[in-house]
Amino acid sequence: MSACEEVDPRVHGIKSTIRVVPDFPKPGIMFQDITTLLLDPKAFKDTIDLFVERYRDKNISVVAGVEARGFIFGPPIALAIGAKFVPLRKPKKLPGKVLSEKYTLEYGADCLEMHVGAVKLDERALVVDDLIATGGTLCAAMNLLERAGAQVVECACVIELPDLKGRDRLNGKPLYVLVESH
């Protein structure tokens, strides 16, 4: 599901602020740059507001943000809905004991880590990132949270690249996006 389907007038403003950078980080990739969205206070606020409106009454206790751009959107959503924020980081960035999950993405392989004890059994979690492409990152995030005992309620992204069919890899887990890009 996406906010586009609901034709919220804020979505057009958000979409218009996202810059597409060809051939970054390597040839053939059309990089969806959200840094230009962040330069527009209204578009940034509208982005956060749309997510908060969706999740305010869903009894979510954990907002897990995927490094690095999930760190931009996750904390304000968590604060607004009264949830804790759990960072899902790249390897060797978190001190102490961690759980790790390796995954592949459209231009390589990576790994996410989370502190042991960051989530408790049966906590309701929301996974937040800026974009879903092939779905590898979101799958790794969900696996990490579920291995720790959390119940992933939904994944939320600002942008979806539907042609890469990442949604299909989420094993039926709901995905909410604001903007589809082709």
Image (spheres, rainbow, N blue to C red):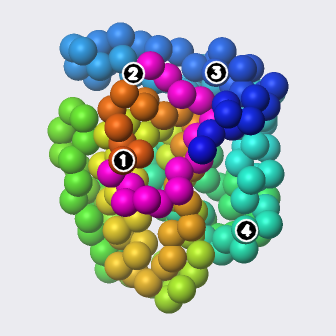
Q: Is residue 173 magenta?
A: yes
Outermost residue, bottom side: 121
The magenta stretch is: 169-182
Relative depth, front residue between 48 and 122: 122
Instruction: First in sequence, mark 1 or 4: give its number.
Output: 4
Relative depth, front residue between 58 and 71: 58
Relative image position of residue 75 (x, y in whole percent): 65, 55
User: What is the three-letter code of the residue carrying label 4?
Assistant: Lys
As helix, strand or loop, the secondary structure at mark 2 comes to strand
Distance in Å between CA atoms under marks 1 and 3 = 23 Å
Name above or below for residue 19 compared with residue 103: above
Disc 2 crowd rating (10 Å Cα; few below 14, some 14-19, many 20+) is some
* Dot label at residue 31: 2
Relative image position of residue 19 (x, y in whole percent): 53, 15
Distance in Å between CA atoms under marks 4 and 3 = 26 Å
Relative image position of residue 16 (x, y in whole percent): 66, 15
Quarter-of-image position of residue 177? top right
Tell us which disc is closer to us: 1 or 2. 1
Name above or below for residue 146 compared with residue 111: below
Instruction: First in sequence, mark 4 or 3: give its number.
Output: 3
As helix, strand or loop, the secondary structure at mark 1 comes to helix
* Dot label at residue 15: 3
For residue 93, say whether it is visible.
no
Q: Is residue 175 magenta?
A: yes
> Which residue is disc 4 drawn over?
58
For residue 149, say whether it is visible.
yes
> Which residue is disc 1 drawn over?
168
